[in-house]
Amino acid sequence: MGTDAGRSGQGSDSQGGRPSTVHLAPPLTEGVVRSLHVGDEVWLDGTVWGVRDASLIRLCDEGVRPEADLEGAVFLHTAPSVRREGERYIPVSVGTTTSMRMDRFTRECVADLGVGAIVGKGGLTADSVTHLADHGGVYLAITGGAASPETLQVEEIEEVVWEDLMPECMWKFRVRDFGPLFVSIDSHGNSTYQEVQDRAAANLKSAYARLGL
Amino acid sequence: MEGTVEKLRLGTDRMYDDLVEVAALLYKKALTDLPSDVRGAVARVRENEEGGARRRLEVMVNAIDTSDRTGIIVCQDTGICVFFVRLGTEFPINGARLTDALRQGVARATTRHDLRSSIVHPVTRENNQDNTGGGIPDVHVEFVDGSDELEVLLVPKGSGSENMSFLKMLSPADGMAGVKRFILESVVEAGPRPCPPTVVGVGLGGTADLCASLAKKAILRPVGEPHPEAEIAALEAEMLEVLNETGIGPQGLGGSTTSFAVHVEYAWTHISMNPVAVNIQCWRGERARATISTDGVVKYGY
């Protein structure tokens, strides 16, 4: 653990105050998840699991479970490029894919597997906002398309589950100073994406007026 | 090992081997070395944003720098390769062998740099593991009368932005009002998914396929370079201003810059047609260009 207050693993306490920056180490307790609010900035140290379309289909639709305990785990929407060296995989590029394709798996991830945080880009639907609120989960937005720094924040690929799904296996990454991640859907029913979309829809009306439409 | 090709061995079969290498170099360059106009746009917008939006722009600047320093590709998405060839009528080449060389170059770069193979059969989802497949890379060829140059431009288009493509066969009665409305609605519907700030490519006129192709062609222009015709340039400026008023912002999480630019390309169309297409490019705007003259000398750019 580092020295700054946020590294205590207690999460943030930004309600009513300014957004805060916290360093967290998974697994995340429900208390820590509930302490996060939209606008907070999060950095992660420790285990992050890479998942994507194919691995989530196996996990959720086919009900196959890995040996790992996923209670409080962090899921990252990714299919990395890797290079094989002997028995190990070395990261070539670890980036983040559009989360919306994996939206329908949110309920099972948080309700049945106990996942504490989902890291992705582009956000999730209103249904997912409800599931995250009901079961104590949070959605952390990474900056999409910026995979080169993200790759360097992955210290090691510790384990690969379901290699037959390459590159869409479950990847156990050990990360250090992984971020910045932005709380964009919290466990209190708030979604920055929804706010921005609502505002954009309202702004469309004035845009039409300006264009004389 | 990776080589450099400074000169094609024109007039011999070896020139096609050289072109394979040129294509491989272009693929790696496009994925690691962002165009100078994109770098300028990212840096400029960072100064205009504040709070979280500014933090996200800082990450983009960091990604560009990190790739410069390490050679790691900027985005994990290796894209779907689209080549735009401008072939001078005075440049001696077999076009079929050129097309084959471009395909081989994509495969070579994929193996050489352990790039993720993103290309699959649309029905079976089979993956050749080399970023090629039936019809891919897509190769567009334009002939330039009297020119003695060969220009090869590669855009490895990311799926996040390409999935946010839209076409509508409007009616002439919908007029330009319908066109403007469609562009706005498309960008709002795309929201965070194409990784804003984006370049919004717009195709007007033509047939359905030509219109979609013009929208793609529009994103090839250096970011913010206006259309040479004043009327079209004015439309681009007007649309950019209202798009940015939506407040979608960088990564769709709010802010003043949803798009760096709107680029419009057009073709004439049928009296009873009014097609409009939108093709969005993500913030990285990856592209790489090789220009080859009749002495075989290759110049690399964006």
Image (tube, rainbow, N blue to C red):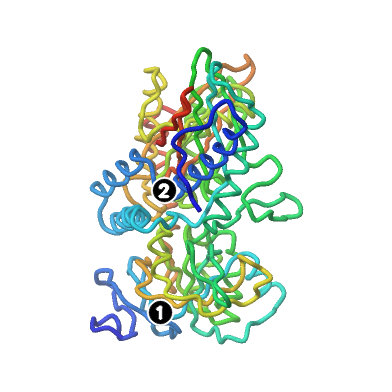
A70 shown above or below B7: below
B62 shown above or below B299: below
Q: Amino acid at mark 1?
A: Arg
Q: Specify the label residue B86 is tagged with.
A: none
B226 sits left or right of A113 in the view: left
Where is mark 1, residue-wise? A34
Q: Residue at x 47, y 44 (%)?
A: B188
Between residue B130 and residue A206, name the one nearer to us.
B130
- What separation in Å lies between label 2 and label 1 (alpha carbons)? 29 Å
Location of the C terminus of chain B by quadrant is top left
Crowdedness of circle 2 by 10 Å Cα count: few (<14), some, many (20+)? many
For numbered disc 2, what is the local secondary structure?
loop
B261 sits left or right of B156 in the view: left
Q: Position of residue A71 (x, y in %)?
A: 52, 85
For numbered disc 1, what is the local secondary structure?
helix
B269 shown above or below A96: above
Q: Residue at x 32, y 57 (%)?
A: B62
Q: Position of residue A80 (x, y in %)?
A: 53, 64
Name the subunit of mark 2: B
Q: Amino acid at mark 2?
A: Pro
Residue A66 is drawn in which quadrant? Answer: bottom right
Q: Residue at x 34, y 85 (%)?
A: A9
Pointers 2 and 1 within a single chain: no
Name the subunit of mark 1: A
Crowdedness of circle 1 by 10 Å Cα count: few (<14), some, many (20+)? many
Marks 2 and 1: which is nearer the front? Answer: 2
A210 sits left or right of B146 in the view: left
Between residue B187 and residue B17, name the one nearer to us.
B17
Where is mark 2, residue-wise? B196
